[in-house]
């Protein structure tokens, strides 16, 4: 039942906020997200890491469509639910410096988004997964459309149609598999696994691509990324945080849960292609990030590079790679929220995020600078920060998979250092100009957001074992399902 | 059948109202009467009684579609109440609408081609008048004239087709025709097939499938917005029900003859209607093209498995009708006295009147097929049916066109939330606010619990 609570509690509060429009909506939203966090921490506390599926609920919903409300939590789900419930309070808190018009709608939509995200990470029914997947798109679309930047009308529509196009092909693939399930058709994930694995190589390849494109657009992986930089830069900061911190992980989660075990032959045949595409994306996005003039855009491109590495690691189909992806998802979520918040702080104080107009903030704001350094080092994967653990595992898995690819992907560390250090140097050091000389240091709610995040970056970097433990057995399980099927074909 | 009596009775009462001078109460009487008719439909459920020497049969199919027509009409009377505000001809308008509804009921329950023809004529003649009910307006006159010419032309095709089929089989009864076709396969005269195809063309006019849709945008645009709302919901439901009935019973066994033609019509409808809708600046015209486009999805379900598609088509139409009524209701409120509402009129609506904006947003999202709204489940059922019958390439066409659909529906949404308001806050009456909330609730209920309607047929 706790899973149901985790899904519907944010929805309930969201509806209350949207309908009643209370004063101090942000406080209500923050309180709700903290209750949600507490509930998820309780789940994590009582979670048995070798216990397989837990907290599951399976009730029929729409019989004629074979749709059941089947949700459950295993290690992989738990990590991502935790990521969601940890980040949402910070995202809400980070908005306290803004005065958004129609605040109750704004916070209502954020909580609705949280509902859909938790739903995506726990659903064990194909159609239910799809419903939550799409349900996540609606609130973020309106957040970007109502409170976004000047170009938002055109850009958000592109984003919407792009992601919807991908997911409709996923729907076709799921429905196709649904009709292959024996007896009374069902969308139950395990029935779909069996139906998918029983297919020949050609249909599996088609399903692989239908699903892969949906996930690749969401992540986004090169060459499906063209919506991302514009959307990230035009969305309001909280929207960008939701998109990059959590929503992007839907795509990665989708690959792990809904692609690898679903069509093992398809994955076997096209896995290498997916790895190559991802590695190209890493280099491509890093190079573009290096020449960006705008800090927000730079981070957007750096996010493509990081996601490319995660995706490449997953398609090595090794336990190391997927475990690395899990920890890197957590780390990237935390880091990218912090980075976008840092950009937001700079933007609010100087009215710009263009690197050339910044500089010299270091002298005016030492605490802010220190925080930025730590977050940046985490992002370039310095040992003992959270970024290191994941990147190490991911590159390790790639080197074992194909040595040359591992080496090329490893360049991400060097290129990442180049663009992150360059952005830091241009914005923080150097001569202060008229605007940056009076830069105020971190204040109340900003400290509340950034200090815990810095702490998490270091703690996860030094002692990642508890997180790795949580997902270990579930990841093993996925790898096993995959290798059993592909072995049985031989 | 009893429901049909009630509806006709209401129409006659409307006419008497002018003489007996109880115009004030008329709308209340009609609404109560329609509620009663709906109750009678429920009471008749599972009875399948035939009337007048089997000329009308009220089986569950007919009853479900009759119920849908009555339900949509009730909601329509609520959305279009301003249409009856005018001092003159109030009773004429409501009488015409009621007779049109009666025609629609005949079109769902006929068991005899003559009854089909009568139903179509009763419906159409009422609509010709209603389309021109803004007498001083040139566009409205044009709409009426165009609709009349095109409509009678199409009816000519239909009638010719019926005659040829009668000539070949010697009967008007659709079941007897179906049996005759089944038992005399291979010895049917070629003019029977010609008759079937002529009927296909005649009915394709009525459901406004491409390339027989040319009348629809002009007629929809010129008619008063309320009448357009009626045409694109109640009339569409009736037309599609009659189309389904004829082709799933009479001509089911000769499916190979019409299958390819209908396939081409379906693809053309999906592609052309949706692409043309993108280029419309008038929201009314855009909705007209979108309503043509929706016929394409219904035809896709029909082609996938024409005998089993009734449940899917029924749900699709129900979802479509609710959303469409909400969209037209909002159009009436935003457009006000202006008949030709451009997208710009919706600028900043979210700030001018959030309730209308949210209601319209949900309606448009549902029309665009975004889950978990009923429009999604409608499309889902269609796609699932087509995938199950090996029509994946056509599903991909339908997916692409529904993405195009997202594009033009979202133009209105973007205008509402993104553009700055050009006018004062929009004031609407409490009744209309309640209506919008009711429509939102119906939409959400259909989206979250679609099972009831899906399993009805």
Image: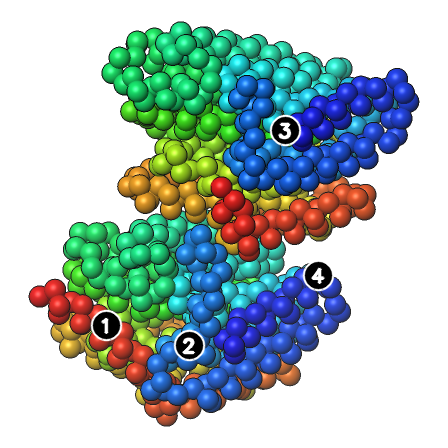
Q: Is residue B284 above or below residue B416?
A: above
3D distance between C-alphas at marks 4 and 2: 31 Å
Q: Using residue A299 as the reference point, say whether residue A411 is left or right of it.
A: left
Q: Is residue A363 left or right of residue B258?
A: right
Disc 2 to disc 3, how far (Cα)? 54 Å
| A131 or B98: nearer the viewer | B98
Of the pair B15 and B86, the residue shown nearer to us: B15
The residue beneath circle 2 is: A73
- C-alpha distance separating marks 3 and 4: 43 Å
* Residue A418 vertical placement versus A163 (above, below): below
Residue hosting label 4: A19
Q: Which mark is residue B1?
A: 3
Q: Seen in the image, is B59 located left or right of residue A382?
A: right
Q: Position of residue B128 (x, y in %)?
A: 65, 16
Mark sitting earlier along the chain (4/2): 4
Q: Which residue is mark 1?
A: A481
Circle 3 marks a residue in which chain? B
Foreground disc of the pair 2, 3: 3
């Amino acid at each position: 039942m706790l899973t149901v609570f985790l899904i519907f509690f944010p929805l309930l509060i969201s509806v209350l906020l949207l309908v009643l429009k209370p004063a101090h909506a942000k406080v209500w939203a923050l309180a709700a997200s903290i209750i949600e966090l507490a509930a998820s921490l309780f789940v994590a506390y009582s979670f048995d890491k070798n216990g397989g599926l837990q907290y599951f609920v399976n009730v029929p919903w729409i019989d004629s469509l074979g749709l059941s409300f089947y949700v459950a939590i295993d290690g992989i789900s738990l990590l991502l639910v935790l990521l969601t419930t940890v980040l949402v309070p910070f995202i809400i808190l980070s908005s306290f410096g803004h005065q958004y018009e129609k605040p109750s709608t704004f916070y209502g939509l954020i909580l609705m988004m949280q509902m859909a995200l938790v739903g995506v990470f726990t659903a064990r029914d194909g159609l239910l997964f799809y419903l939550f997947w799409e349900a996540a798109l609606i609130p973020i679309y309106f957040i970007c459309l109502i409170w976004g930047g000047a170009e938002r009308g055109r850009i958000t529509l592109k984003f919407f149609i792009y992601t919807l196009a991908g997911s409709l092909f996923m729907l076709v693939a799921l429905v196709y598999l649904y009709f292959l399930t024996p007896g009374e058709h069902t969308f139950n994930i395990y029935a779909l696994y069996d139906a998918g694995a029983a297919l020949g190589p050609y249909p599996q390849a088609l399903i692989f691509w239908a699903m892969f494109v949906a996930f690749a657009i969401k992540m986004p992986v090169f060459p499906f990324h063209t919506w991302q930089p514009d959307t990230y830069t035009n969305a309001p900061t909280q929207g960008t945080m939701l998109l990059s911190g959590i929503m992007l992980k839907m795509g990665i989660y989708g690959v792990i849960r809904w692609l690898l075990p679903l069509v093992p032959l398809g994955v076997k045949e096209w896995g290498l292609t997916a790895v190559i595409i991802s590695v190209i994306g890493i280099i491509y996005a890093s190079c573009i990030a290096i020449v960006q003039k705008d800090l927000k855009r730079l981070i957007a491109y750096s996010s493509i590079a990081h996601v490319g590495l995660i995706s490449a690691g997953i398609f090595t189909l090794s336990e190391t790679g997927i475990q690395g992806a899990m920890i890197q998802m957590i780390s990237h979520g935390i880091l990218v929220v912090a980075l976008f918040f840092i950009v937001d702080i700079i933007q609010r104080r100087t009215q710009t995020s263009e690197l050339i107009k910044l500089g010299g903030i270091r002298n005016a704001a030492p605490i802010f600078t220190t925080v930025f350094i730590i977050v940046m080092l985490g992002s370039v994967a310095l040992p003992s920060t959270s970024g290191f653990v994941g990147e190490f595992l991911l590159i390790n898995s790639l080197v074992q998979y194909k040595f040359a690819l591992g080496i090329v992907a490893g360049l991400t560390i060097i290129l990442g250092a180049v663009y992150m250090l360059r952005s830091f140097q241009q914005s923080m050091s150097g001569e202060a100009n008229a605007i940056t000389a009076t830069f105020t240091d971190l204040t109340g709610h900003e400290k509340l957001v950034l200090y815990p995040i810095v702490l998490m970056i270091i703690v996860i970097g030094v002692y990642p074992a508890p997180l790795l433990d949580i997902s270990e057995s579930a990841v093993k399980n996925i790898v096993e399902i995959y290798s059993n099927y592909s072995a049985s074909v031989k | 059948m009893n429901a049909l009596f009630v509806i006709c009775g209401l129409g006659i009462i409307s006419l008497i109202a002018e003489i007996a001078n109880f115009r004030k109460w008329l709308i209340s009487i009609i609404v109560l009467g329609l509620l009663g008719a709906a109750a009678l439909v429920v009471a008749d459920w599972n009875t399948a009684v035939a009337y007048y020497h089997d000329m009308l049969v009220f089986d569950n199919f007919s009853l479900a579609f009759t119920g849908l027509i009555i339900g949509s009409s009730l909601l329509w009377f609520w959305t279009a109440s301003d249409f009856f505000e005018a001092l003159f001809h109030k009773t004429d308008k409501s009488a015409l609408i009621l007779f049109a509804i009666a025609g629609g009921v005949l079109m769902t329950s006929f068991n005899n081609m003559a009854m089909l023809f009568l139903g179509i004529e009763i419906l159409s003649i009422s609509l010709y008048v209603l389309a021109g009910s803004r007498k001083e307006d040139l566009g409205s006159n044009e709409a009426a004239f165009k609709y009349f010419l095109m409509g009678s032309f199409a009816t000519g095709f239909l009638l010719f087709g019926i005659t040829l089929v009668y000539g070949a089989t010697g009967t008007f009864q659709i079941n007897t025709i179906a049996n005759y076709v089944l038992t005399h396969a291979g010895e049917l005269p070629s003019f029977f097939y010609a008759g079937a195809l002529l009927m296909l063309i005649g009915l394709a006019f009525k459901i406004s499938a491409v390339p027989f849709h040319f009348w629809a945008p002009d007629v929809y645009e010129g008619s008063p917005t309320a009448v357009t709302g009626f045409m694109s919901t109640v009339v569409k439901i009736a037309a599609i029900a009659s189309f389904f009935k004829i082709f799933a019973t009479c001509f089911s066994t000769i499916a190979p003859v019409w299958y390819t033609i209908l396939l081409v019509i379906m693809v053309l409808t999906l592609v052309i209607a949706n692409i043309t809708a993108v280029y419309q600046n008038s929201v009314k015209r855009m909705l007209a093209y979108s309503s043509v486009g929706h016929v394409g999805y219904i035809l896709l379900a029909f082609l996938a498995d024409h005998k089993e598609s009734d449940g899917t088509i029924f749900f699709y139409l129900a979802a479509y009708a609710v959303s469409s009524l909400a969209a037209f209701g909002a159009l009436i409120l935003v457009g006000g006295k202006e008949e030709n509402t451009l997208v710009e009129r919706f600028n900043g609506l979210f700030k001018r009147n959030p309730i209308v904006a949210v209601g319209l947003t949900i309606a448009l999202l549902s029309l665009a097929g975004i889950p978990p709204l009923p429009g999604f489940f409608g499309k889902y059922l269609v796609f699932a049916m087509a995938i199950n019958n090996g029509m994946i390439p056509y599903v991909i066409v339908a997916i692409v066109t529904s993405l195009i659909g997202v594009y033009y529906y979202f133009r209105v949404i973007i205008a509402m939330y993104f553009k700055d308001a050009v006018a004062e806050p929009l004031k609407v009456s409490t009744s209309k606010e309640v209506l919008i909330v009711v429509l939102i609730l119906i939409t959400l209920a259909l989206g979250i619990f679609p099972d009831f309607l899906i399993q009805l047929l």
